[in-house]
Amino acid sequence: MEDDAGVYQLREELAIITSVDYFTPIVKDPYIYGQIAVANALSDVYAMGGKPIIAMNIVCFPAASMDLSMLEEVLRGGSDKLKEANVLLVGGHSVIDPREIKYGLSVVGIIDPRRILTKGGLTVGDKLILTKALGTGIINNALKAGMVDDNTEAEVAQSMATLNRKASELAVEVGIHACTDITGFGIAGHLSEMIRESQNVGIAINYSLLPLFSRVEEFAKIGLIPPGSQRNRGFYEENVIFSKEIPDWKQWVMFDAQTSGGLMLSAPTQKAERLLARLHEEGIEKASIVGEVVDYPQGKIVVK
């Protein structure tokens, strides 16, 4: 089974879980960039119900064209986010990059292999909960064009820098059927993976229930679609059936490439309602039931 992180079992009740991720800056503030990169790198471990415990920095830095103080701020942001997550930084590796800075981490966590959350396991009748708003790709593309106001920029940056730790802990506590995090493949891509890893199921999404960042639809309507989201549509469009009520510009939300997005959680109705209430109690206000697992059409995502 293909999943969000690698797992190696040490004994019956203990396994290590590993992942790695890094990317170029998507916000102007280097400190916030460092925080987002860490939250994103830890997310794959959280998506499987694991507890990250140690990490190592990965840095590519254009020393000839960028002041070292910029890197210091990135690493300070990353260090502070690791402390928030109770993850110990044990080292790292850096190289000179002639073009641009890149930052991320390799992460090691621990998990009880009997309680792993996987992408598979979708069960007909399950409700689907998304824990963060969508639209980071579209907003970040608009940011590059200088079209994003300070409030919207701050809203999206705060979300991307927010750990998925509490959502993961609650999902394990309540007990769910399946989980993944919504990142570069967009919601359509990651739901397609969940369908593929499950048995004889499809997914129905209610577009009106999708939590979106401010101005996402505004920017989508004028065509500010980033290259990654365009590639996602090429890869996954055949898996998605849109109702006639969803115009083309709204459809882009389903393919928008996310950075440090939320978790997609699949659980039976009663557990899903209890989990949603707990998520809201813990301040995860954007968490929403956005759809359900269906028996037809198998292998497809229907958006209405």
Image: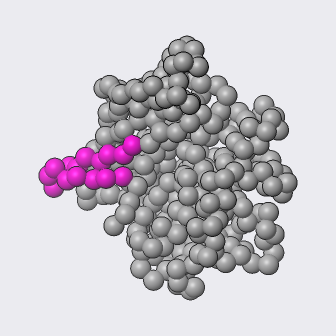
Extreme residue in the bottom direction: 296
Q: Is residue 101 above or below residue 285?
A: above
Residue at (42%, 74%) from the top-left corner? 198
- x and y, in percent, of residue 204 in the image: 62, 75
* Residue 301, picture quadrant: bottom right
- x and y, in percent, of residue 270 in the image: 51, 67
Residue at (31%, 53%) from the top-left corner? 6
Q: Which residues are magenta?
A: 5-20
Quarter that holds the N terminus: bottom left
Quarter that holds the C terminus: bottom right
Residue 96 is one of the magenta-drawn residues: no
Residue 7 is one of the magenta-drawn residues: yes
Residue at (46%, 45%) from the top-left corner? 43
Depth check, front residue: 22 or 181? 22
Depth check, front residue: 70 or 300? 70
Instruction: Tell me if I can see residue 204 in this picture.
Output: no
Residue at (31%, 42%) from the top-left corner? 109
Q: Is residue 250 left or right of residue 10?
A: right
- x and y, in percent, of residue 277 in the image: 57, 54
Q: Is residue 61 left or right of residue 147?
A: left
Q: Is residue 235 above or below residue 11?
A: below
- x and y, in percent, of residue 271 in the image: 48, 64
Depth check, front residue: 159 or 135? 135
Instruction: Tell me if I can see residue 179 in this picture.
Output: yes
Give the image's coloring scheme: one colour
* Residue 284, picture quadrant: top right
Question: Magenta-highlighted stretch: main secondary structure?
Answer: strand
